[in-house]
Amino acid sequence: MSGKVVHFEIPVDEGDRAVAFYGAAFGWDLERWGPMDYWTTRAGDGEGIDGALTRREEPGHGLRFYISVDDVDASLAAVESAGGRRLTDRMPIPTVGWMALFSDTEGNTVGVFQSDPSAPMPE
């Protein structure tokens, strides 16, 4: 299904502190994914979306969510046609899929995600 919110990211300044907080406050089991400052979680039991904690990129970097799409490139074209602005080109998430970021008409940064287990490692 395209258009469903499938992932969130919470920016953090201190990874260990944030992992401890979300674990204690909500029972989230967070684990580091890959070599970067990125910790994934199944956010609770039952329905809902899962997400991650990620290193804050810049002051003002806020909560970000990702929308499932069938084609990242076509979605970016639709975003631009609707008045949004492409922030990144399509990027691989190795063995998971493709993602890109855009700015909506209100200045919010939003991600799009296309599932593709054959997505390669970046060169």
Image (tube, rainbow, N blue to C red):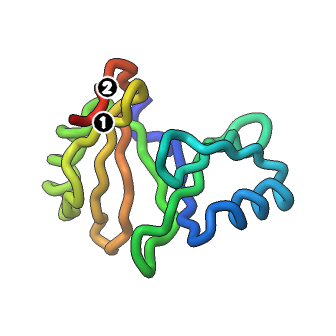
Q: On the rendered image, what quadrant is the N terminus found in?
A: top left
Give the x, y percent position of residue 7: 52, 45
Q: Residue at x 76, y 44 (%)?
A: 29
Question: Vertically, is 83 above or below 9?
Answer: below
Of the pair 21 and 114, the residue shown nearer to us: 21
Of the pair 35 and 58, the residue shown nearer to us: 35
Residue placed farthest to the bottom in the image?
59
Quadrant of the image occupied by residue 95: top left
Give the amino acid type for the residue marked by disc 2 in the picture. Answer: Ala
Give the x, y percent position of residue 9: 53, 55
Q: Residue at x 30, y 65 (%)?
A: 104
Q: Secondary structure at mark 2?
A: loop
Q: Residue at x 47, y 40 (%)?
A: 4
Marks 1 and 2 sit apart, C-alpha to C-alpha, by 6 Å
Quadrant of the image occupied by residue 12: bottom right
Residue placed farthest to the top in the image?
118
Query: Looking at the image, how many numbered discs can be counted on the residues?
Result: 2
- Residue 92 is tagged as 1
Horizontal side of residue 50 vs 20, given as left or right = left
Give the x, y percent position of residue 120: 29, 26
Residue that badge 2 annotates: 119
Q: Residue at x 31, y 25 (%)?
A: 119
Residue placed farthest to the front in the image?
35
Give the amino acid type for the residue marked by disc 1 in the picture. Answer: Pro
Q: Local crowd at mark 1 within 10 Å, few (<14), some, or many (≥20)?
A: some
Check contact, mark 1 vs mark 2: CB within 8 A. Answer: yes
Q: On the rendered image, what quadrant is the C terminus found in?
A: top left
Q: Secondary structure at mark 1?
A: strand
First in sequence, mark 1 or 2: give its number: 1
Q: Local crowd at mark 2 within 10 Å, few (<14), some, or many (≥20)?
A: some
Of the pair 70 and 51, the residue shown nearer to us: 51
